Image: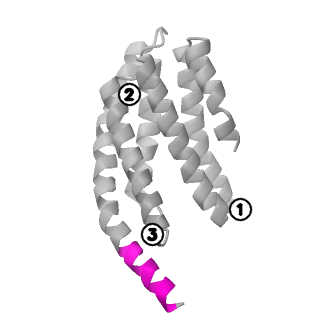
Amino acid sequence: LVRLACLPVFLWLLFGRDSRLAAGVMIGCLGATDWVDGWVARRFNQTSPFGALFDPTVDRVLFIVGLLSLGINGAVPLVIAVLILVREVGIGLTMVVATAFGMERFPVTYLGKWATFVLMFAVPSLTLATSGIALEPLFALVGWVLVIPGLVLSYITAFQYLPKVKEHLRSGRQRRTTV
């Protein structure tokens, strides 16, 4: 919930203050705290069905709004923002529709988590590469080194989810008809 509440602050930093540096740091912190949040929940047995649904939803909202904003602002190349957004929106809509039609939820794959992890560091790096700080070339290098494999991995995992969606949709429907 705190991460979601930070989204307006990110937007204000990017557009209101016109500070790519602050916005890049903020979006990077939001991405890093996603991992921390998950680790704490698992470590202290604080997981719940609500959290299992809410956390990925918050991740997608942050990712979609953040990327759309950074693409519009020019902090991240528009083509990169669009490629990431197409995958995120496509998978998000697929999951929502399939769940509405009875699909049993299934966990994110290990590769899917890696793709998200890599992109959550690539996007802030690309943002900081256009922030006016002295380390711009370093952030550009890190951003591009991460974003290409992150994009490839994210699309591979998206296509790997399709048979799982079909399988879990079938099993969810079967379970509903036998109950």
Q: Amino acid at mark 2?
A: Gly
How far is the residue under mark 2 from the one under mark 1?
A: 33 Å
Q: Residue at x 46, y 44 (%)?
A: 117
Towards the viewer: 108 or 90: 90
Task: Check disc 1 and report the residue beneath it.
Answer: 46
Q: How is the image coloured?
A: one colour
Task: Check disc 3 and report the residue beneath it.
Answer: 101
Q: Residue at x 53, y 23 (%)?
A: 24
Marks 3 and 2: CB-CB under 8 Å?
A: no
Q: Is residue 161 above or below residue 36?
A: below
Residue 31 image position (x, y, % from top left): 55, 38
Q: Residues within 10 Å of mark 1 (few under 14, many from 20)?
A: few
How far is the residue under mark 3 from the one under mark 2?
A: 38 Å
Q: Earlier in the sequence, mark 2 or mark 1?
A: 1
Give the mark toward the camera: 3 or 2. 3
Towards the viewer: 9 or 40: 9
How far is the residue under mark 3 from the one under mark 1?
A: 29 Å
Q: Earlier in the sequence, mark 3 or mark 1?
A: 1
Q: Which residues are magenta?
A: 167-178
Towards the viewer: 178 or 120: 178
Residue 118 image position (x, y, % from top left): 41, 41
Residue 142 lies in quadrant: top left
Q: Is residue 141 above or below residue 58?
A: above
Q: Residues within 10 Å of mark 2 (few under 14, many from 20)?
A: many
Task: Check disc 2 and report the residue beneath it.
Answer: 143
Q: Amino acid at mark 3?
A: Phe
Instruction: Determine if the magenta segment contains residue 168.
Output: yes
User: Element at badge 1?
Assistant: loop
User: Element at badge 3?
Assistant: loop
